């Protein structure tokens, strides 16, 4: 059993594929919704605009929802986190709406996009962040950030002009605003945690 | 808090099969420094925040060789990889991304056809498009140019293309602002006057650009020791510092540079 990476035609999946291969997660790039069945875990990447991601992800929505309901571990990364919400200030398209709340632009007081390494403030003791501390840095690249209606879904935040949701954990659904596949050894640890949880 | 980034830059000659890292002085006098993926892996292990590969070759096999370099690097290096040199169209971007790159830097082709920036940003997002500007100081205020007060008197800065071999007549500072408007995610700003000299970054130039754009500026050209990086972070709004020679020839490790900065109050990832 392996980890699926949803390849829905946005951006660059090589990095996440490579990182999963490096930790021996046996990744598979999945380009058709009907092939999404039977995986231990599913990674939903995302780069570029929210609207473009949603338009291309739409055909995967039923397959992803079934997987979520069947208890498959799902990890959204970057815009792959944002699409879990109801919508974004960036684009008129509706999000998946699995998490109540909106995606809004980073404050004007800081350089946008946030590009670079930032630390976390861990809010909850969750398995996906096992082995991670507030001193560890992760690589962020984003112009928008998630604002959940219920802040209790937030597992960690980061500080960028204001407190920004960096990681979400709710049952078998995880999401990170940063790029674990580009965050050195600590990022790989998070992917390892995800793979381990997927195989439980 | 967002850390200041330290970015080793590998100038790659791709005329040999594995490629080789070289370094020029003021864009001339080339010196050999090592195999690209080996150096990249070493810098990753030492704590580099990102790695930039610049293709300085003009050979016809360059594209394949660069893809091999990126592929070999991306297997073991899990930080952002940027690739520049010879990126002229979205198809060139796709090719290096499929090999494992995360960002491209565009220079000559964007100066000649600025819409390239919007095209890359539209397809891959602004974060994927770094606009590299090689700036040469010109004496005097310059007609219709943004004038900067420097220790050598009022100056303007001219953007160069073709790796410093030709000059565009374009005001480098105004071009940075235009690049931001077109969708650039970052500006990689190299001082041609300082590049390879070890005399330190061009502070007035870096300050002038970082004051005028709202995207990250990567300072480049002239880094000879960690105090130069300390200076550019203390005196300008630069988000990152790029250096080549001080890392290549074993004078400083990336980790040593970061410890030096951290001890002096700069927030870096250690």
Image (cartoon, rainbow, N blue to C red):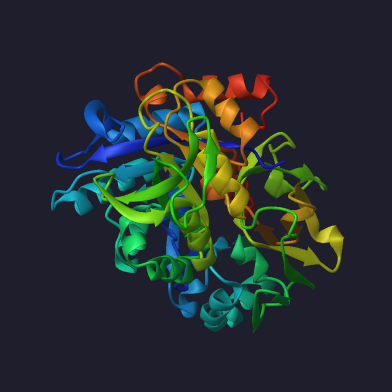
Residue at horizontal 85%, vertical 69%? A149
Percent from the top left, x then y, of residue B32?
A: 23, 26
Q: A74 or A105, which is in the foreground? A: A105
The picture quadrant where one finds residue B54 is top left
Q: How many marks?
A: 0
Q: Residue furthest top?
A: B251
Residue B18 horizontal side relative to residue A130, left or right: left
Looking at the image, residue A187 lies above or below residue A44: above
Q: Does residue B16 appear in the picture of this structure?
A: yes
Looking at the image, residue B131 lies above or below residue B254: below
Looking at the image, residue A148 lies above or below residue B192: below
Q: Does residue B102 appear in the picture of this structure?
A: no
Residue at horizontal 59%, vertical 26%? B230
Residue B92 horizontal side relative to residue B176, left or right: left
Q: A86 or A125, which is in the foreground? A: A86
Percent from the top left, x then y, of residue B187?
A: 49, 51
Looking at the image, residue A45 lies above or below residue B204: below
Residue B47 horizontal side relative to residue B21, left or right: right
Residue at horizontal 47%, vertical 46%? B141
Percent from the top left, x then y, of residue B70?
A: 32, 46
Q: A102 or A38, which is in the foreground? A: A102
Percent from the top left, x then y, of residue B85?
A: 30, 50
């Amino acid at each position: 059993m392996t980890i699926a990476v949803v390849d829905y035609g946005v951006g660059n999946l090589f990095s996440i594929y490579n990182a999963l291969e490096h930790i021996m997660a046996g990744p598979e790039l999945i380009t058709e919704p009907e092939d999404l069945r039977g995986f231990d875990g599913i990674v939903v990447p995302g780069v570029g605009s929210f609207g473009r991601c949603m338009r291309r992800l739409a055909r995967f929505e039923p397959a992803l929802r079934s997987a979520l309901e069947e208890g498959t571990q799902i990890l959204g990364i970057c815009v792959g986190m944002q699409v879990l919400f109801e919508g974004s200030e960036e684009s008129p398209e509706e999000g998946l709406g699995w998490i109540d709340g909106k995606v809004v632009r980073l404050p004007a007081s800081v350089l946008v996009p946030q590009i670079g390494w930032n630390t976390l403030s861990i809010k909850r003791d969750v398995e996906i962040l096992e082995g991670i501390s507030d001193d560890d840095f992760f690589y962020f690249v984003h112009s928008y950030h998630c604002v959940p209606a219920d802040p209790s879904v937030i597992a960690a935040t980061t500080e960028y002009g204001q407190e920004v949701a960096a990681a979400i954990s709710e049952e078998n659904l995880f999401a990170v605003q940063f790029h674990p596949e580009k965050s050195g050894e600590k990022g790989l640890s998070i992917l390892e945690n995800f793979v381990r949880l997927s195989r439980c | 808090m967002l850390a200041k980034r330290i970015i080793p830059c590998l100038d790659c000659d791709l005329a040999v099969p594995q490629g080789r890292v070289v370094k020029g002085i003021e864009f001339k006098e080339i010196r050999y420094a090592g195999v690209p993926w080996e150096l990249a892996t070493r810098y990753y292990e030492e704590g580099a925040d990102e790695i930039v590969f610049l293709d300085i070759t003009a050979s016809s096999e360059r594209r394949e060789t660069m893809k091999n370099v990126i592929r070999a690097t991306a297997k073991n290096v899990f930080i952002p990889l940027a690739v520049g040199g010879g990126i002229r169209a979205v198809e060139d971007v796709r090719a290096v991304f499929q090999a494992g790159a995360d960002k491209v830097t565009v220079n000559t082709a964007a100066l000649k056809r600025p819409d390239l920036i919007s095209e890359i940003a539209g397809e891959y997002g602004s974060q994927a498009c770094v606009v590299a500007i090689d700036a040469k100081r010109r004496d005097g205020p310059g007609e219709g140019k943004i004038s900067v007060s420097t220790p050598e008197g009022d100056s303007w800065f001219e953007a160069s293309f073709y790796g410093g071999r030709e000059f565009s007549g374009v005001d480098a500072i105004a071009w940075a602002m235009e690049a931001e408007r077109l969708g650039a995610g970052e500006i990689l700003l190299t001082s041609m006057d300082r590049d390879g000299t070890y005399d330190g970054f061009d502070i007035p130039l870096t300050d002038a650009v970082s004051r005028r754009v709202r995207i990250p500026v990567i300072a480049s050209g002239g880094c000879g020791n960690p105090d130069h990086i300390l200076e550019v972070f203390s005196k300008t709004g630069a988000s990152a510092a790029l250096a080549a020679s001080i890392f290549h020839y074993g004078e400083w490790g990336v980790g040593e540079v970061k410890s030096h900065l951290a001890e002096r109050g700069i927030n870096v990832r250690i």
